[in-house]
Image (spheres, helix red, strand yellow):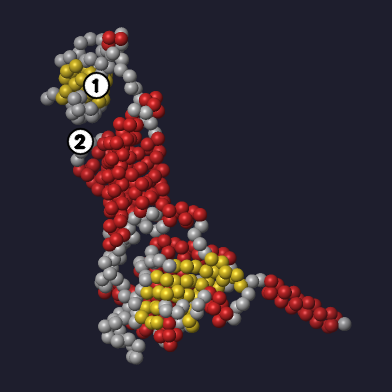
Amino acid sequence: MDRLKGVWMMVLLMLTLGVQAQDKKVVVFHMLVADVIDPRSNRYTEMGLAKAIEMKADYVILELDTYGGALDDADDIRTRLLELDIPVYAYINKDAASAGALISIACDSIYMAAGSSIGAATVVTGEGEAAPDKYQSYMRSIMRSTAEATGRDPKIAEAMVDEDIQVDSISTEGKVITFSVSEAIKFGFCEAQVDSIEDIMLRCGVTEYEVYKHELGFSESIISFFLNPFVSGILIMVIIGGLYFELQTPGVGFPLAAAAVALILYLIPHYLGGLAANWEVALFVVGIILIVVEIFILPGFGVAGVLGIGATMGALILIMLNNDMFDFSFVNAGDAFVAVLTTLTAVVGAVALMFILGVQITNTKAFQRLALSETQDKQEGYTSSVYVKENLVGKKGVAYTVLRPSGKVMIDDQLYDAYTRGNYIGANEQIEVISDEGTSLKVKKIG
């Protein structure tokens, strides 16, 4: 009786587990990379794979249609795919060239749509020329090791990079390997030709499943919006214009706040998008510091000002480019042109804003509430000689503070507000009063 009871309990348990297994649908996680491989696609796939792990997806399908891109970003994606415990299937929907071929080979299985191709993994510069051999050697190495890790012919993978590597009956001297669908199937670089994700899952014997398509979230969409060169140009213009108007009307606060917000909106998306490196942000900060030093500490317009403007402008341009510590080998010439043009246009726009709107802003009622716009004439009974009780013209003293052009001077052990005719006078330098009309003494440097 106990034995019969035990049998029934086991049958009931198996039925329960069977029902639970039927209730659980297979989750297929779908990612689409249909552009160049760059920091944005790197971040997109990184977040996607993390989401797939979080969802406990059963399969990951990486749909590719790319001619390649940055080698360092492709290597990051390749490494994540090789380390992922979830089966990953590459679905080449037309092109997987260069970095795209590397990423495809890192997947567990490769499927291709009709008319697709895979290969041509020679590393090229931003101008389309073959990169130096050190890059080709590295690409050959990771293509070989990736093919070995996923059970594909490593020599064929190398021949996709190096035109000097010949593979019997497959490649000819002087040409890198690029496979069509039928060739890729024949030589083990494609499982089958398919028309859709449904075809892939049918070949895996999976009929009941749900597809989760990974798309950019709201925050990522905002980041992409601010990475637009046009938007970046507007932000640069606000940064420069805000700093200028704050210096013109110190203490108002709004221009400085606008510049700070624009700077944050410019830097953070580029940083999160993988374009802005720490050293580029540091270069921008150094540039701002040099400009501040030139304005408030050093007289005139000299080396600090020139270096500050150069560092700031250079940083704004470099932040938009995917360079590696001034290595522009893989920076597309078009991207570099857009970055330089965007920055220069923004600067010109900011200068125009200063001249055109500067006068109009000072005439607005809002500005007049902040600044003194009326004169207090002597004919109306006003007097400006408030602090000066005696005639000090011709008196000599010393500059108590730096005068650029205003500051304080010491005459007969008494402090007075003073200003120059526009000249710079350093602290403790000898001065002479040339006018005492008004609330401040007009002085000149002597000696």
Residue nearest the observer in this picture, 217 or 264: 217
Q: Can residue 149 be seen?
A: no
* Place of residue 230 in the rendered image (x, y in percent of width and height, measured from the top left): 36, 51
Q: Can residue 209 be seen?
A: yes
Amino acid carrying mark 2 in the image? Gly
Secondary structure of the residue carrying numbered label 1: strand
* Place of residue 79 in the rendered image (x, y in percent of width and height, measured from the top left): 44, 71
Residue nearest the observer in this picture, 240 or 413: 240
Q: Residue at x 16, y 20 (%)?
A: 432
Q: Mark 2 or 1 closer to N-term?
A: 2
Q: Which mark is residue 418?
A: 1
Q: Which mark is residue 388?
A: none
User: Residue lying furthest right in this view?
Assistant: 1
Image quarter (top left, top right, bottom left or bottom right) of the C terminus:
top left
In this figure, which residue is indicated by the disc labeled 2? 300
- Examine the image and state in which quarter residue 244 appears: top left
Q: CA distance from mark 2 to mark 1?
A: 19 Å
Horizontally, residue 11 falls left or right of residue 24, namely right
Secondary structure of the residue carrying numbered label 2: loop
